[in-house]
Image (tube, rainbow, N blue to C red):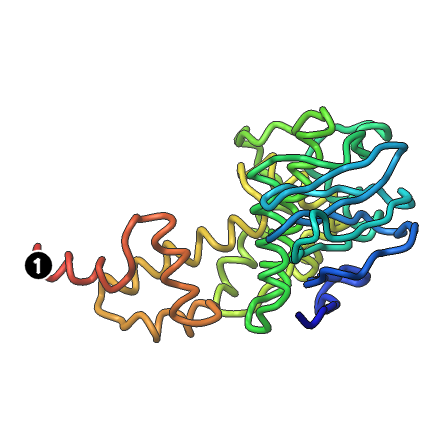
Amino acid sequence: MQEQFQYLPSPHIDGLSAFSARMKEFSYDKHAHEEYSIGVTRKGRQDFFSDGAFHRSNAGNVIFFNPEQVHDGCAGAHSELEYEMVYIPETTLLNMMQSLGQISKNQTRLTHSLFHDEQLRNQVLQLSQVMRDPTLSALEEEAALLSIAQSVIRLGGGTFNCGQYHGRKDTLLLRAKEYILSNLQQKLTVDEICKTANMSKYHFIRLFNQQFGMTPHQYVLNCRINRAKQALEVGDKACTVAVNLGFADVSHLNRKFKRVFGITPHQYQRQLIFNI
């Protein structure tokens, strides 16, 4: 087999990168990364030594290295190994965790390097997939990264901020909400939205989540899906709706619409016609 190693830097977030490897004979020397290194074993077995212990990661497991955590690595059991990894700058992940919950310095560094955690596994693969799709926006990438931050808080024993809506009429947050509703057709970023509220990025994410019960990305997506539903009801074609509401393409609209309504936009329109 031909061994392959591929790195992909994020087009949106400085220092964030994805990595995929296919190997059998190669062995990594003892080393450490400055970033959080979180990976998923896709095929075969991944053997590594870290923190005074030897670990074996089978397919489906998650490997987690804190910044500056020393480790090595190789394919185990003389088998072909395939895995994916994301490298997340420490400051980026810490800021996201602090925007979502209450977590101590000790809790930001997990004490285990190997997990069988389906949720974190899917989140890492999702982020890797988003980074490889040039049609997706910075908002999609940050949302995938936020989901990983949520899992690190969960696994580290931290607590989450209350996400309930308390009815407080915060003028700055309402201004940000109005900006979102007026620009759904654009490729919005959290940086652009928080500027309208005159807040720092992660402070804005925390307060927005407390006020409206969802992150800015979730809110933007929810508004787009609801607008899409209204447009479909008056007969607009799905391809037109996708373009007008900032979806990457029709497939993107289909996936997101079905996650909310259980059916695709085309199926929804057919049911409307049938029931008229």
The N terminus, quarter of image: bottom right
Amino acid at circle 1: Phe
Identify residue for label 1: 274
Name above or below for residue 54 compared with residue 38.
Answer: above
Name above or below for residue 149 compared with residue 268.
Answer: above
The answer to whether any part of residue 98 appears in the image is no
Q: Residues within 10 Å of mark 1 (few under 14, many from 20)?
A: few
The answer to whether any part of residue 255 appears in the image is yes
- Measured as percent of width and height from the top left, residue 13 is found at 74, 62
The C terminus, quarter of image: bottom left
Q: Tell me if 129 is positioned left or right of 64 in this view.
A: left
Q: Nearer the viewer, residue 81 or 122?
A: 81
Residue occupying image coordinates x 56% and y 46%: 122
- Measured as percent of width and height from the top left, residue 118 is found at 56, 38
Residue occupying image coordinates x 15% and y 57%: 271
- Measured as percent of width and height from the top left, residue 2 is found at 69, 72
Using the rendered view, name the quadrant where residue 195 is placed: bottom right
Q: Tell me if 98 is positioned left or right of 60 in this view.
A: right
Residue occupying image coordinates x 60% and y 39%: 209
Residue occupying image coordinates x 58% and y 59%: 140
Using the rendered view, name the quadrant where residue 64 is placed: top right
Q: Nearer the viewer, residue 50 or 16?
A: 50
- Measured as percent of width and height from the top left, residue 128 is found at 63, 59
Residue at far front of view? 78
Q: Nearer the viewer, residue 37 or 130?
A: 37
